[in-house]
Amino acid sequence: MKFPKITSSRPKSCFSLKQNGFSLIEFMITSVIALFLVLGMSQVFLASRSGYELAQAKSRMQESARIGIESIQRDIRMSGYMGCVNDGARIRNQEIFVRLAGASNFRTFNGVNFQSNFARGAEGFEATNTAPGEELTLNAGAPAWTPALPAILRGLPAPGSDVLVLRYLGPERARLLDFAPDVSGPTVQVDTSVTGPVVANRVYALSNCNQVSFFVPTSVSGSGDTFVASGLTGAEFYNISTSYLYEVTRVAYYVGVEPATDTNGLFRYVMDEGQAAPQEAYVPNVASLQVLYGWDTQLPLPDGAVNQFGTAAQLSTATVGTQTAFSRVGQIRAGLLMVENTNARRSSAQAERGNPERILGADISPEETELDQLTDVYETTASPRNHLFGY
């Protein structure tokens, strides 16, 4: 009798199966290679992000500088504007035709307050050690200006920044409807549809092509269109068909500190009666404002060619013949030192501490140049349209 063959169903030992996968050494090598790839990709990402932040910071800086430069250009072009009485006529004419309230002498304009000294369409104050060829580190010394700042501007500009003051008639004017002369002050009626009501205790001007008279209105009517031109006398007469009433504009540009952010910026201070100095910068992140003035030295009459440049300190004492150089200013150069913070690090050359920026010939260094701070200079040149000396 045969017995059936018995076979075992027991599986083969797992140790006999063929092994697949990485060895420990292969895994370690692969991990290192992957790590290097991730690090490389991270560096590319960081470099791209840094480049983007730099581009954004430069764009912000350029946009801010454009706003500041355009505003300064606009006011420079208008400075000295007194209607159709141009500077050529002012220098050539021998009669008294510009009358300023408070002036004890209509030739020298002595006694006129600083804001209303329209004998100087453009005026400036030079910060110490900022003239062409000089060097300055911002906030490194005691603040000082030449000539000394007037009371209305003291305590406002930051050290190392020039101050530029511009005065002109405008931007709005009103047509005269009536002018009744009186030795104690003429009664004037104007069309206020463009300018709005006349405001008491502000400075205005009446102008035609022969004379300009500055005054403060009193006895202003409820509608603001009729008033007494206080300070004018019976010697002045304005024909209603050729004369206009102008608002006056008196602005000061300077770099100051914003209290809210404790950062420097460009301020535009409209020096109207009772108008407090601004607390917010017109343009942020401006470290310094520098200004140069050009004037015509041709005698006896100017020919319109600017042939001498100087600082506000030089302009304040300069004369041409028997006249001050203020009446001969035909060009103004202004420069802004811009600062913009960014999280992107710059190259070692850009990040060098103490590396000054040249602005209108002066070397100005920011107070502290960090690795994440960009600086650049933007300059402009503009000519007062009323100082072109056309005859």
Image: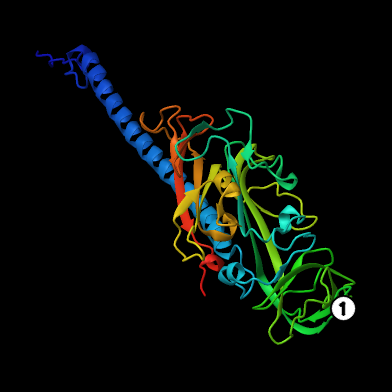
- The residue lying furthest to the bottom in this view is 241
Vertical order, 146 against 108 (above or below): above
Q: Position of residue 342 (x, y in %)?
A: 48, 37
Q: Nearer the viewer, residue 72 or 8?
A: 72
Asked whether, in this view, residue 202 is left or right of residue 314, the answer is right
Q: Residue at x 68, y 61 (%)?
A: 118
Q: Position of residue 76 (x, y in %)?
A: 56, 60
Quadrant position of residue 10: top left
Q: Residues within 10 Å of mark 1 (few under 14, many from 20)?
A: some
Vertical order, 170 against 360 (above or below): below
Q: What residue is pinned by disc 1? A: 182
Query: Which amino acid is tagged 1?
Result: Asp
Q: Nearer the viewer, residue 244 or 71?
A: 244
Q: Residue at x 51, y 64 (%)?
A: 300
Asked whether, in this view, residue 382 is left or right of residue 209, the answer is left
Label count reads: 1
| Colouring scheme applied when the structure was drawn | rainbow
Quadrant position of residue 126: top right
Quadrant position of residue 193: bottom right
Q: Is residue 90 visible?
A: yes
